[in-house]
Amino acid sequence: MTRALSDLDLRLAGLLAEAGFARAEPPLLIAADLVRDLVGEALARRLFLTGDAEGNELCLRPDYTIPVVQAHLEGSRAGEAAAYSYLGPVFRHRPGMAGEFNQAGIELLGRADREAAEAEVVALGLKGARLYTEGPLTLALGDIGIFMALVAALDLPPAWRRRLAKDFRRSGMLEGDLKRLAEPARNGSTHAGLLAALEGSDPKAARALVTDLLSIAGITTVGGRSAADVAERFLEQAALGTGGLSAEKVAVVQKLLAIDTDAASAEAAIRDLAAASDLAMGDAIDRLARRNALLAAAGIDLSAARFSTRFGRDVDYYTGLVFEVHDGSGRESRPLVGGGRYDRLTDMMTAKMGLDIKVPAVGCAFWVERLAVAGGRA
């Protein structure tokens, strides 16, 4: 059972409302398949599942973002800018802790001035955290878009771009795959004939062909995976072995990922590295520079904010800015506030709903129980 909302929690809700974020009250139960498709395996394993009388599988909301965005997209003003706030219970399996806990947060949808929206969310995240504690707060920043711009500038095959994007969001994989990239292309694959026949074909058609071949061979499942899943895996693994990357370019990736310094110095270091390596990353770096300027204008000391090019999240839908606010006193080791830009989530949801619109999205969650600990009030 969640603890009762405190006076500070209610003050936070008031602060968010005063900032122009309308209070959202989405349902407790949402479609489980929708959540699984959007959040990735790490969070999907922590869902509380149930069902309705019609046999549909549902889950208790694991956070507010998905149901808030869903309600916005289902409304009559889906293509317009909107700002939402929330405060209430969410539900996740958490070993050794209660599965139901309170969370507050904001979602800023449809804003075309992306960097301004991001700066607004970060500034409000810090302001909300400050309600709970007078002690030191630290700001950690990252930008997934910087890494993805580097991957695009290296002109890698699509399979490798997808693989490195997954690696970046999941710890422990990136170094191994960078080493693999530096190896010479493997031309002697036992599947070379099939790969040559599929080269240049439509990806859907290639998957369908491999799926049919498996079916003809009487293979319908392998280790619990369907023939279609096996075909997808085969094509990805085969493509990953068809081209290497020079050691010099792998070194550039490693240099970028080693940048971990104050936000102002990080911007300069990334720009210098891109120029020295002749990499077309200007748009992503310019977006970073505009956001930094807006954060500084909002009174945030960039020399005290930490920026790491390795900072990402294990949820697949983040696409640009990521940030966390931490307790500098050490009372609470986990993030107090966390969020970022999640355009991929809205892209996936609009595609599922058949909507031909783009909805830029950025937001953050306030972990109110951790904030209470940081403020010495737990």
Image (cartoon, helix red, strand yellow):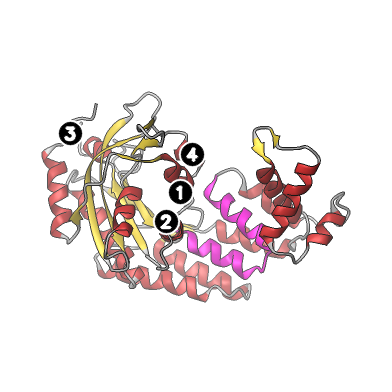
| Residue type highlighted by circle 4 | Ala
**Up/down of 355 relative to 35, above or below:** below
The front one of 98 and 176 is 98
Q: Residue at x 55, y 56 (%)?
A: 258
- Magenta segment: 143-170
Whole-angstrom CA distance, mark 4 to mark 2, is 19 Å
Residue denoted by label 4? 42
**Up/down of 187 relative to 328, above or below:** below
Whole-angstrom CA distance, mark 3 to mark 1, is 35 Å
Residue denoted by label 2? 349
Q: Main secondary structure of the magenta part?
A: helix
Marks counted in the figure total 4
Q: Secondary structure at mark 4?
A: helix
| Residue type highlighted by circle 1 | Leu
Q: Which mark is residue 38?
A: 1
Foreground mark, 4 or 1, reads 1
Q: Quadrant of the C terminus?
A: top left
Q: Position of residue 165 (x, y in %)?
A: 57, 55
Q: Residue at x 76, y 60 (%)?
A: 244
First in sequence: mark 1 vs mark 2 = 1
| Residue type highlighted by circle 2 | Met
Q: Which mark is residue 309?
A: none
Foreground mark, 1 or 2, reads 2
The front one of 226 and 21 is 226
Instruction: Mark 3 and mark 1 in contact? Answer it, CB < 8 Å.
Output: no
Whole-angstrom CA distance, mark 1 to mark 2, is 8 Å
Foreground mark, 4 or 3, reads 4
Foreground mark, 4 or 2, reads 2
**Up/down of 287 relative to 93, above or below:** below
Whole-angstrom CA distance, mark 2 to mark 3, is 39 Å
